[in-house]
Amino acid sequence: MKGKHVLLATFSLLMLTGMRDPFQQPKDHCHTGELAQWRYQGMVGKGGRNIGLLQDGQQRWRRVEQNQILDNGWRIAQLNAQTIVVNTGAACEPAQWQWQRQGKANETMDSGGAVGDVAPGTGRKSAERVANAG
């Protein structure tokens, strides 16, 4: 009889403490695993309001404003043309996350060189080749 009581007490204790599968990832209440998947594309000013453009982990675009609370509980703490900062929560690690604006890899690449510059192999004849032509 004593064995049944010990077994019942042990089983009850396990059920009350919320036994979880040790091989399963713990629940991420702060959604910090998603932080690296989001992208900040920039900001648009409209009627005195600044609206940031964020792309989430599912590749959906979101328009966000300062102090807005997102679906996952993050709050937009700071928003400017180059960066956006979110507070993930007091009990979360990290408590704050910042993204830099995503742009072209090399924005000067598409601007082209000076008008007189001719890159070798572009198909244009340089002034020297034209003068020596015969």
Image: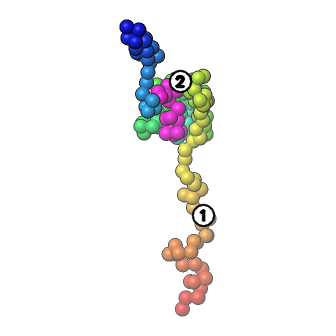
Residue at the spot 54% in from the left edge and 50% down from the top edge: 104
Residue 32 visible from this viewpoint: yes
**Quadrant of the image occupied by residue 67:** top right
Indicate the position of residue 74 as horizontal and vertical percent values: 53, 26
Which circle's residue, 1 or 2, is located before the other in the chain?
Answer: 2
At 59% across and 41% down in the image, what residue appears? 100
Q: Which mark is residue 68?
A: 2
Query: Along the line of sight, which residue is nearer the eye, 120 or 26?
Result: 26
User: Which quadrant holds the C terminus?
Assistant: bottom right
> Does the magenta run of residues contain 29?
yes
Query: Which amino acid, by three-letter code, is at mark 2?
Result: Gln
Determine whether 65 is above or below 55 in the image.
above
Which numbered circle lies on residue 44?
Answer: none
Vertical placement of 99 versus 91: above or below?
A: below
Q: Which residue is mark 1?
A: 113
Measured in 3D between alpha carbons, the distance from the residue under mark 1 to the one under mark 2, in whole angstroms, is 43 Å
Check disc 1 and give the amino acid type.
Gly
Pick whichever, 50 or 86, lies toward us.
86
Q: Residue at x 53, y 24 (%)?
A: 68
**With respect to residue 76, does 13 lie above or below?**
above
Front-most of 104 and 128? 104
Q: Badges 1 and 2: C-beta atoms under 8 Å apart?
A: no
Q: Is residue 54 visible?
A: no
Element on which disc 2 rests: loop
Extent of the magenta region: 26-40
22 inside magenta stretch: no
Above or below 45: residue 4: above
